[in-house]
Image (cartoon, grey):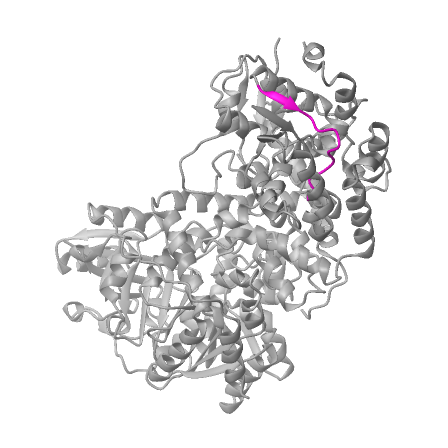
Amino acid sequence: MTSREKILEAVLNNQPDLSPLPDISMFKGNHNNVVQKYMDVFRSIGGKTFLVENLDEVNALITEHFDINKRVITTLTDLSDRFELISATVDPHLYEDVELAIINAHFSVAENGAVWLTEDLMGQRIIPYICQHLAVVINAEKIVPTLHEAYDIIGLGNYGFGGFIGGPSKTADIEQALVLGAHGPLTMTVFILK
Amino acid sequence: MTVGLFIPCYVNQFYSNAAKATLQLLQKLGVEVVYPPKQTCCGQPMANSGFEHLSQGCSDLFIENFSAFEYIVAPSASCVLHVKDHLTSQTNPELALSIRSKVFELVEFLTDVLKVEKLDATFPHKVGLHHSCHGLRGLYLSQMSELNAPPFSKPQHLLNMVKGLEQISLDRSDECCGFGGTFCIAEEAVSVKMGKDRVNDHIKSGAEYITSSDLSCLMHLEGILHRNNEKVKVIHIAEILNATL
Amino acid sequence: MKQTKTKDHAAMAEAFIKDEERVDWHDGALWYIREKRDIASKKIPEWEQLREAASMIKNNVISNLHEYLLQFEANLKKNGITVHWAADAEEHNAIVYAILKAKEITQMVKSKSMLTEECQLNEYLEERGISVINSDLGEYIQQIDNEPPSHIVLPCIHKRKEEIGELFHKHLGTEKGLSDPTQLTRVARKHLRNEFLSRRVALTGVNFAVAETGEYVVCTNEGNADMGAHLSEVQIASMGIEKLIPQKNHLSVFLRLLARSATGQPITIYSSHYKKPREGQEMHLILVDAGRTRQLGRADFRDSLKCIKCGSCMNTCPVYRKSGGLSYQNTISGPIGAILAPNLDMKMHADLPFASTLCGSCSNVCPVKINIHEQLYKWRQVIVKEGYAANTKALGMKTMAWTLSSPNSFNTAGRAGRWVLQNIPFVVNNKLNPWYKQRDMPEGSGQSFAEWYQKNGENNKEDLK
């Protein structure tokens, strides 16, 4: 008997009578004022947000807030005249020295500040984790109140990799002192397009 | 209404004033009280130590002593919870179940059965209320701080009826004191540290008295207070609710 | 880090408590997290309903695990992930080793995984010439100090920053006396970044595995799981079979509860959904039993398998806060550890269910509503019946039971008092009695209530007036 068979047999013998799944459809968030709620929550986590009219404003804010003399990469074709476009096919290790990555997210969640991205929007899976600073552009009307609405949108998901990212990487492992910038980005900025 | 008074073994021996206050308070409120003389213990010390199977004798005796009463009342949340959760009978399981449903801790008996809204009591002191865990999380005498649910407190409701009493608030409203039955011996160091921290929360907040509906917690806290020559005293809630000037 | 045990929890705790300043700090730091959890949970009006839903989903998982395992396996394969089954720790470790060996790889980076701690994977691989580096900062600190994690979410919560500074000085060459958390974190960031960039295999744990889609979710705050996984040629995930959830949208319930319960955060910074290998990458997933099916068969204890490893029961547990996680001597410490450990080795962990006052706070904070304190009580009964209680305790209990169930020996006024004084542990007038070490005995009131009632019973109303 293989371990697989042994485990499955033991599970079958030992599991109790079927207990029903609950209905979770009543869990719903409140859509009122989600943009403001999102910004408040995201800032409380240590993120930065800017409410902007268009990508020109994004461009200007990036110049103002980041060191664009260092390596800046993006998946946004509108920004490709200024910044390097991310290649989906090169060795991910080559992005080791990225200062800033500017990418789109599908949507964000007001209750927890997180944005949802799949690998197609990341350019490469490693991008939002390896860069020193992460900037994400979302549409204001794409902000949902809670994770329940979020998973309604995600559905079963046709991706190889996807993730919620809810702020700059952090740790409090040393005496519970909060330090932003553990292994991932030191800062995270979200540009919300009105 | 006739109530069988259940006085747990250690209360009988060491805290007879609390037992007398319970008796007198119930009588003041017009309740007929009978104390069955052959009572001993609910069996909790054995059961909580893993010897539930040795506590049948205690259960049988409890049933013998108390089955005839309409209500059974005790000034000890912990013992009451044990009876409510674990009283069994080999010969008459239904009788055991019916007794489980009529045993009450004093505070809940006052608020839920007698529905007391007024007390003739005076206790002009600063008092800290220590929630016994069995009273709080077992008998739901108050709302538990962990839950997202509306607040209430049965002992506080009663203490609010006492003239002159000032309730102090604590940093940790319902932290365990560390008594824990035989835990107090088996895990002496942790038990004492928990007790010290609980006592210090009360001292820091200016309490003159620590009260509770469980004397086992109070006995443990008193032991620490005495040893450290603290002025703060412990007092069972029955003694406060029964206090006159 | 081999599992041996020469002292029980009480003795380990006593040693920990000797440094009272540290205990007070430890207690305060964990209580602060409990308070943050309270604040976060009270911002969600439907919090208690979410807990109930999570509990029900996990009940369903436990009751239909066979089906979900098959479904999950089929979907993993469809997604291009290689599936392995491990009956025990040894088999799990051998599978990891075989994957590394096939690629002739001798270095691996690992993000937080309590399961691989439980399996002692690092030791196993190191004996075979593979170097493993723990990338979670807290786990990294514990690794360089050659100590297991003391908390499942906060692995080095028992250490002071000066001690960590000293470790960094010794292992990473930082300047002596450096203890600033930000500076220490920056040093670790730089050091571990090189490890991420150079290691070809990354192993992660699994927080949730979705049967319906064949994907798994890993939650971190540091980004270390992703740094390892997305730079690796070979990605391995190890999970206990109980980590399954039926449907994708159930993640909404669990991710709302997990971080709020754990640290009071609204969500962990990273909640990564791994579904398929990227181009040119290999992905393996190891399903591990290691005692879980045995626990599944224990009707009174199978609910412990619902645990989502948030650590909230540890933060709220006053015994844990005062005694430190290492005193439990089990990978999973605290209340949840105390109901999981006896299943693994009842004799060795017989002390753990007794390391509790049964206060019940753990069950109240548990996001999946495991009745932890009731299981502690039930484990005590099992452990005593199986003969793992100390003999002296058993004898004392029998005497007590006999006396307390015999009114004639107990309650004839004078004899009762004598018996209580001689036998109830907290009143034995003896300096060897642990009660008396740091506590005085109750003074008593001279006359017992029973004696008083016997004399004044019928006339007591007069007497009391």
Magenta span covers which residues? B31-44
- One can see residue C224 in this view: no
Residue at 53 percent across and 33 percent down: it is B171
Q: Of residues B191 and A33, which is closer to you in this image?
A: B191
Find residue C388 and report its horizontal and vertical position in percent.
75, 61
Q: Of residues A79 and C385, which is closer to you in this image?
A: C385
Q: Is residue A135 above or below residue C77?
A: above
Find residue C436 and report its horizontal and vertical position in percent.
80, 37
Q: Of residues C58 and B189, which is closer to you in this image?
A: C58
Side of C6 where C59 appears, left or right: left
Residue at 31 percent across and 64 percent down: it is C249
Give the main secondary structure, helix, strand or loop, of the magenta stretch: loop
Give the quadrant of residue B122: top right
Q: Of residues A21 and A154, which is closer to you in this image?
A: A21
- As for residue A112 lying within the magenta part, the answer is no
Side of A82 where B201 appears, left or right: right
- As for residue B38 lying within the magenta part, the answer is yes
Find residue C123 and report its horizontal and vertical position in percent.
63, 76
Q: Is residue C220 above or below residue C101?
A: above
